[in-house]
Image: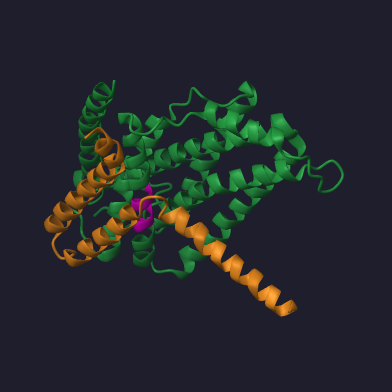
Chain colours: A green, B orange
Amino acid sequence: MCKLVHLENGDLNGFSGLFESCSLRERLVILMIDQSTVLLFITVALASAVEATEALTIILASGITRGWRSTFEGALLALACLAVIVGVAGTALIYYVPLYALRIVVGTLLLIFGLQWLTKAILRQTGFKSPHDERDIYDKQVATLSTGKKGILHGQRDSLAFAISFKGVLLEGMEVVMIVISFGLANGSQNQLGTAALAALIAVAVMTGVGAVVAKPLTKVPENYMKLGVGNLLTVFGLFWMGEGVGVQWPLGDIFLLVLLAIIFLATLGLIAYFKRVHKSITEAEL
Amino acid sequence: MHSGKRLSAVGKGVKSFFTFWKDFLVGDSPVLALGAIIILCVAYLFRGSAVLASVFTIILVLVLITFAVWQKTKARRHAYN
């Protein structure tokens, strides 16, 4: 009998020798657990990259217009606050809240976020909403910051740069924090919280590195496509965990995640095609 | 007077706390948040049957996305009509 299938997800370290003793079906289950971890990593990394791109635009606008010291201080304080929230809330939730309750709350939150991202992404893809343009947002931020008075906190600190940077990073980062905590806890393993946090950290580090090198808004990042992908993934994970939370035994177990992903993705493509046609006919009639 | 001012500041703080979370979770599409709650209730009702739960929740998600996009494009379509 395979001992590995009785292990909790995330506790699979050092199992390679025991893997040989498992039947084909049991091996498939174990591989699916790993696949859902990979899917989790990709979702959190993509979502974090999107939010990091948006936060970076605000930091660049503030730093170039008002100076880097106060901008960095604001951003660092916001990052510290976000790290404390992940550490404290994540650890407290995993120890004190039952798994089914976590899955219901986390699933519902992810479903709401996913549906919001997906709807916006479809509207942008079809032309009903203007695409997210980092250059445009950057120019508007620079115009606002240029007219503001130089507020001194202590010594050379600029209160406006500090506040804009702090607020921007905290607000954009809060969504990442919610996603990291949700994905980290819904599987009921603390290891997944580490995986989710690592995915977010890598994505933010990569985007920050690229931003530091180019020193201008990251207009080349395909943000709209990324939002479409993340919207799909959040919706799928949200529905899946919400169902598990209330006691639904999904057919095929974890493999059902891929079935859900395929259905939602195909439906999204269908909606984009339909509403693109609607938008085209409206635009032609208006001309 | 002093405690009145403090109470008013606390009230403002509580109000802005709830406004932040309302904007954060509901945003400009209350229909999506409401729809997610309805999907949760449907999943709970059909929790005993994997097939029924999957079919109904998936259909509801698809209907919800379509309705949300349709609703957001309504103004433009009405202007055209």
Residue A153 seen by the camera: yes
Quarter of the figure with the N terminus of chain A? bottom left
Q: Residue furthest right?
A: A155
Q: Is residue B21 magenta?
A: no
Q: How many marks?
A: 0
Q: Quadrant of residue A99?
A: bottom left
Left/right of residue A135 with respect to residue B34 in the rendered view: right
Between residues A242 and A280, which one lies in front from this camera angle? A280
Q: Quadrant of residue A6?
A: bottom left
Residue A96 drawn at (x, y percent)? 47, 70
Residue A5 seen by the camera: no
Taking A80 as reference, is A225 above or below it? Answer: above
For the point 29% across and 20% down, the residue is A287
Taking A264 as reference, is B36 above or below it? Answer: below
Q: Main secondary structure of the magenta part?
A: helix
Left/right of residue A125 with respect to residue A63 in the rendered view: left
Left/right of residue A95 with respect to residue B47 in the rendered view: right
Magenta region:
A107-113
Taking A190 as reference, is A148 above or below it? Answer: above
For the point 61% across and 21% down, the residue is A214
Residue A70 drawn at (x, y percent)? 75, 41
Between residues A134 and A22, which one lies in front from this camera angle? A134
Between residues B72 and A5, which one lies in front from this camera angle? B72
Taking A173 as reference, is A85 above or below it? Answer: below
Residue A222 drawn at (x, y percent)? 43, 26
For the point 47% across and 26% down, the residue is A221
Q: Is residue A112 magenta?
A: yes
Left/right of residue B2 with respect to residue A88 in the rendered view: right
Residue A59 drawn at (x, y percent)? 64, 36
